[in-house]
Image (spheres, rainbow, N blue to C red):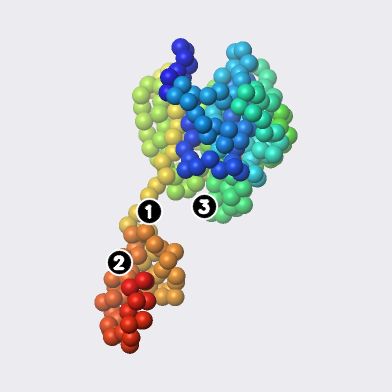
Amino acid sequence: MKLAEGDRIKAFVTLKDFHPEQNIIMCTRNGLVKKSPLVAFSHPRSNGIKAIKLKENDELIDARICETGDDILLATHQGKCNRFSEGAIRSVSRFSQGVRGIRLRNEDFVISMTIATAQDQLENGNPNASTILAISENGYGKRSPISSYSVTKRGSMGVITLKTNKRNGYLASLMLVRDDDDLIIITQGGMIIRQRISEISVVGRNTLGVRLINLASNDVVRDISLVHSEPDEESIDKEVENLKANPALNLEELEGSDTEEEFLAEDEDNEEMEEPENEELDNEEDNE
């Protein structure tokens, strides 16, 4: 993709197809949000197509795919967060500039956007439910339940997500996480650490948080990323034991898994082979 002078890539999304029920949500530094149908971007050009009309001294912060029932959370530099329904945003063309998503004061600006899907909201209260992770520039962070961020009106000032003071510094990032995710923190000075999300306590929304990384003098958190963990050997072994204890389990649900081949092989070793009674039975076994 050819970029104009001074332009740079701010966000990207991955998708298999352009589903007519999905939309692209975009947010800007000055707190504007815009929703456009995903299919409106189905015919790109080599030099790109217009995605949003920006006002002077504004810039794109993020772009995400959303569906009906999702909630949008906008987080600001000074630690505020506004949660509102995607239904509060009217779908418009690619050439529109959007509407106010959060009201900003005292030279505040938006730093991140998070989408809480309908499934995330339904799972709230589960031990492994999604939670909101907030991290400050000085390396402090915390997790809070999604329910602690009340749904408000689009364009309101929102609520405090992390107290910004001398200890914490300003808010660096806000994102949706799960217990089995890993967190990667990158600092301006080039330090990188990785830790499990499950090691970060779930606390109230309006709290200071705990130290996640020790920073050198004048260093600050610059970027945060999530790594979704793969199932380990122990979890796979437990799944095999569960299969042995539940022989009536439908094996079709495990098609393509690492345990299916092992489970079927054990069955073949333990069962006596029977001769098919007729040709029709042979054909049925071949089809299986």
- The image quadrant that residue 100 belongs to is top right
What residue is shown with label 3? 128
Q: Is residue 253 above or below residue 49?
A: below
Quick one: label 2, few (<14), some, or many (20+) residues within 10 Å? few
Mark 3 element type = loop
Query: Quick one: 212 or 125, which is closer to the camera?
Result: 125
| Residue type for callout 2 | Glu
Residue tagged 2: 262
Q: Can residue 207 be seen in this view?
A: no
Q: What residue type is labelled 1?
A: Pro
Quick one: label 3 or label 1, which is nearer the N terminus?
Answer: 3
Q: Where is residue 61 in the image (x, y as percent from the top left)?
A: 55, 25
Which of pointers 3 and 1 indicates the residue nearer the eye? 1
- Position of the N terminus, as image quadrant, is top left
Res. 122 visible in picture: yes
- Mark number, residue 231: 1
